[in-house]
Image (cartoon, rainbow, N blue to C red):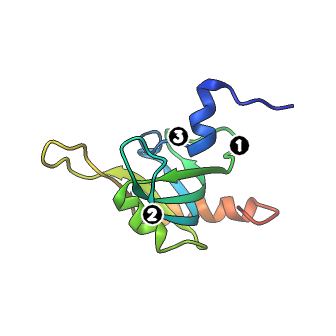
């Protein structure tokens, strides 16, 4: 039997945090958009649930396992919600901090090399990638 450790419970429920993904090349497959989701401690927010794999960068896990995550960051949600049922490839970055608020997380367009990394990973998958 497999057990989730308490220290990993948040990751099991919500997946990786956006801050953990900063600087990483991530392939997202958005699965669901939830308007004004109430599960967040800071109040209701539009949310996208997504399957994902970190292909390169500080958050890459050994073996590049597929994970499931839920994200509420507005700029990320805008991109992913328009692509539910598809795939989005990008590097997680931060914009400029404004008005005393933290800099927003953004998805940077992938480079040609990033697209080659994603294509190679997808071709390695014997079954459907997600």
Q: Earlier in the sequence, mark 2 or mark 1?
A: 1
Element marked by disc 3: loop
- Observer-nearest of 90 and 51: 51
Measure the alpha-carbon separation of dots 3 and 1: 12 Å
Instruction: Classify the position of the C terminus by image quarter.
Output: bottom right
Q: Position of residue 63 (x, y in %)?
A: 71, 43
Name the residue beneath numbered marker 2: 110
Which of labels 2 and 3 is toward the front? 3
Left or right relative to 101: residue 20: right
- Observer-nearest of 59 and 73: 73
Bin the neighbour count of mark 1 within 10 Å (Cα to Cα): few under 14, some 14-19, many 20 and up: few
Q: Position of residue 69 (x, y in %)?
A: 57, 50
Q: Which of marks 2 and 3 is nearer the N terminus?
A: 3
Name the residue beneath numbered marker 3: 59
Bin the neighbour count of mark 3 within 10 Å (Cα to Cα): few under 14, some 14-19, many 20 and up: many
Q: Position of residue 84 (x, y in %)?
A: 55, 71
Is residue 115 depicted above or below 98 in this figure? Answer: below
Q: In which quarter of the image is residue 126?
A: bottom right
Name the residue beneath numbered marker 1: 63
Q: Residue at the location (81% across, 32% down)?
A: 2
């Amino acid at each position: 039997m497999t057990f989730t450790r308490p220290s990993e419970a948040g990751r099991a429920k919500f997946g990786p945090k956006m801050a953990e993904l900063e600087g990483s090349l991530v392939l997202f497959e958005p699965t669901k958009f939830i308007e004004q989701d109430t599960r967040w401690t800071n109040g209701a927010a539009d949310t996208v649930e997504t399957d994902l794999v970190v292909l390169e960068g500080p958050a890459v896990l050994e073996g590049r396992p597929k994970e499931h995550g839920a994200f509420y960051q507005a700029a990320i949600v805008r991109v992913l919600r328009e692509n539910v049922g598809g795939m989005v490839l990008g590097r997680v970055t931060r914009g400029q901090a404004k008005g005393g608020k933290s800099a927003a997380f953004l998805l940077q367009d992938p480079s040609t090399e990033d697209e080659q990394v994603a294509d190679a990973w997808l071709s390695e998958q014997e079954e459907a990638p997600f």
